[in-house]
Amino acid sequence: MKFDYRHNVELTHASKNPRKPYLRMLSAALMSSCMFNTSAQADIGSTPVVGAFYNSTQIIKEKIYSGINKTAVTTRDATLFTIGGITLDAYILTLPLDAKVKARVIGRLTNPLYSIQLGHFLYMFYDRYTGLENTDMFKDYLQTVYTEQALKQYEHSLLSYEKSALNSTATADNTAKNTGLSFNNQFIASMVTIYDTLFNNDEWLLGNNLPEHYTYLTKSPDDLTVINTIQALVIELMTQYSQSIEDGEIKAAIMAIIDDAKPENAHKPNNKAQAITITLVDFVRLNVLKGYRQYSLEQHRIDAFSRWMENTFNQSPSELIQFLQGQNNKRYGVQITVDGLQQGMINALAGNNSPTQPYNPFIDHAYATHLNAIQYQPKHEETIQPEHQQQLDYLTSLATNNPSSANDAHYLPFFKYLYQNYSRSIAEVGISSTPTISVRNLPIIMTGANVAGNGGTGIPNFHFVDREIDRAYYFFGNDALQLDRLIEDNHVQTMFDRLNYLKTLNCNAQYDWNAQVSYDGLINLGIGETIRDFGEQRCLRELTNRAEVEKELKVARSALIKQINNYQDISLWTPLTRITKKKYIHEQIAQLAQRDEQGMPDYTLIYNPWPDHFAHFTGPFSDEVIAPTGELNRLDYWLTQFTQTYKDAGIYDQTLWGMAGDHGLTPVFYALNPEKQVLEQLEKDYGITLKIEKISSDEGEGPKITNALNYPSNKGIDIVVASTAGGNFMMDFFNSAQGWSFQPHYNELTQWRPLDSTVKNKSIDMISEISNRLSETLDYLVVRESNCNLTRCTIRLVSHRDGIRIDESIQREGERAFYSSLTTSNIPQLLDIESTNPYSQALTPQEHYEKQKLIKMCITDAQENDIDTWCNQKQWRQLTSMTPRPDSVNQLAHLYDEDRAGTINLFPKEGIGYNTIVPGRHAGEHYLEKDAFIGFWGTPVGNGEQLKSVANGSLAPTIYQYITRESVVVGENGWGFPSVLPELAIKP
């Protein structure tokens, strides 16, 4: 009978050989010296497996880890847990804790459930993020390749070589001096106090079974008691902090929170003191559970892997040999997400711009746009200009050919290598999902899920109103911690969920509940702005250590194969020799199983937020972004460093790399506030008072705080407004004939009545009011003509061109769409179908012919009453890729698939920002925002087809298909986007 490996992974509460977490913190040299015999012969595992392909990844999924029981691991010596190099109990004694709290914590460390959870929580904050110096590695690197004079020329607001300039990074205290981050004693003590308060009666300590999901706080009496207890600690800390800062906006915001803690404000809607406390408690408890799950599941994986290999060796040694060979030749995937990475820009800066290539107008047009910024100023709409004066020295030098970036070997060398060697596997046009905003697009890129439908993210924008629960979300603030909850509630499968049987690493991204090792994205975002390269250094350290282990693992697997072969050669007539050899092999198997967890991750997710983050404040073409000292060259540097770790590990040739941007950015020269331009003027003209609720901050302003258990209601409100990144302004109305929770349509909005009792019998055409009052700055507004879902939708686009109102329609049935003008019989013009992209190379005669053919097919010959004549998504994508608005028809046709995407979406024209005070915008409909980088590279990539127009959501499914060899079907198993792996011509 064939052995059933699933029975081999039955795990109990007390593991025989619990994993000692301190081993993770020892140096690679120490660990390598005590694990493996490195005197093995040639690397047998590198020899191709004869016969049918052996998929060791599938074996791991289906036979080794499929039956793991997620139970707690408690058999351990708590004194071996170290924080900052000293034991947990000794570390607790160094903290400035209240005497009673300190005594209670020390007394409870004998409870392994208490101590392990606390240890991992502190390890996450202290050891994982400290131990590195406060150095800007990219800045130091530049000094080794550029002269002092050159660097002086490229200085800007984010990088200076002035010797008198003070390091803006945090100053560490005596417990973390020069470690790169000041998680000082007082902060750690506060965390320990909160932890002990949360877990002081063993009611929330993890039991024998690890929960699959975290349970967020509710309004239950027990949870409210916890909140009230912790709130007192939080307010005490905030009061102490407020006394140390000067008067200003920050102090005023803190004092408002403290004021909400007064007893008379306890039941105040959206009480901010309670809101902050709820967020903190959920953050602490969630991270305690996540950290402990990672520790416990690691031990279970080790036990299961060891047991499976031992049983396989006992029953079928040749199968174990085959598996070990497969492990040495398995596939790896690296998925990189870069906020604000635009393909057209990076191609213009790093692509082949030799005289023999067709002229690329990107740089010249971008430069001309800035020179002629005055052309974007409206004549009759009141605007402001961003306060920040953009520094454009490098753009100017490129446009005037002095110097040429192509001749600078240290400018974007990694990207230049990609375009020279993998241009066919970089999409000519990348597609960002509309609205082109991070909170919508990042989970799309990271998971491969769509926004709407089963398994969709359900996150249509940076803000939205959930009418089913009467709750508004805005994710710049403490609602950011709700993103993981929303993804989970919508049953989105992340890559870490799909690959939870493999070794996985999250470097600074979100949605990582099932990652084996995580570096928190919010921590990196909060600290990395001042401590440059903060998250990248820690990710690099992790990969560097694992690369050393991976080299040992390859040798160890080959050595084990040799030992198994030797065992099989031992005569049955020498049983003692066989028994001795078998025991030795079992010992080697146990060591290999434990060490394997520290090898290179099968899947790595890396997130870099900085090109977008700084482009908002300095401008997308500023020196801070595109100069040799800017964020794109910094990104290039870190891509090189990460790549080197895979080469050092000896697995680069087995690794597929993929990278996508969530959107690009376009400059803002003039900005206005639609609330003032439209709604305030409307109130004056009609003599009414509108009840307006603004749920967002303007771009460049501070965050908002929302109470997750006592959020404000949106009922009794006329209009909810919100803005996103300067490029999208969303309005929610509530006058649908179907009821408050339904989105009103175009016809209902042309007869809208405010709640003001004085005008109940007087309707207002809000579509006309909005479009007329924004006629100079509105690119177009988008509104539903009917109920929308994944099957069908009809939307209307409204705007003005040359003072004349234009109405257009997009009707969608399934995969087909009909785009037409409602005001003329001509080809619709709002989406610039007939225009060419001024940032792209001129169309070839063949491309021009194909475009005219598609215009005729999709618009001229299409009949509204005959769906079969409508173009499908692929045809529309091909047509619009040759316009200034890639994939415009498809994206707008699906804008309202998710009901929470607002009632009316306003998109400003080029050069204009809505509700912003900074010079960089996205979320709009301009080419620079819509064109997101997506590309693949690495030794496995062959000479496949040129990727033409590809959605950024294809990144995750392509990496997944490469690692697992499983097919990806859109609409099945939660996939919202196709894999493009077939087009990459992957080498066997």
Image: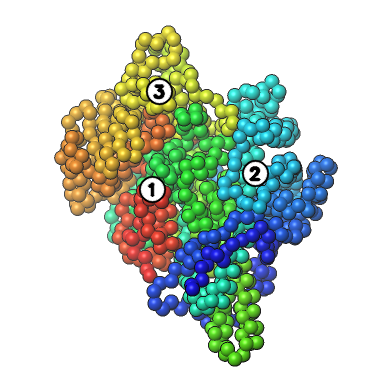
The amino acid beneath tag 2 is: Arg
Q: Nearer the viewer, mark 1 or mark 3?
A: 3
Quadrant location of the C terminus in the rendered image: bottom left
The residue indicated by pointer 3 is 739
The residue indicated by pointer 2 is 285
Residue nearest the observer in this picture, 171 or 703: 703
Label 1 and label 3: CA atoms lie apart by 31 Å
Q: Find residue 532 and report its horizontal and vertical position in percent.
A: 59, 50
Give the residue at x 67% y 62%.
Answer: 15
Marker disc for residue 976: 1
Residue nearest the observer in this picture, 528 or 92: 92
Decide: few, some or many residues near mark 3? Use Cα within 10 Å; few <14, some 14-19, many ≥20: few
The number of discs equals: 3
Q: Find residue 951 and report its horizontal and vertical position in percent.
A: 36, 49
The amino acid beneath tag 3 is: Gly
Q: Nearer the viewer, mark 2 or mark 3?
A: 3
The amino acid beneath tag 1 is: Gly
Kind of element beneath mark 3 = loop
- Mark 1 or mark 2, earlier in chain: 2
Tell me which corner region of the image, top left, top right, bottom left or bottom right, holds residue 826.
top left
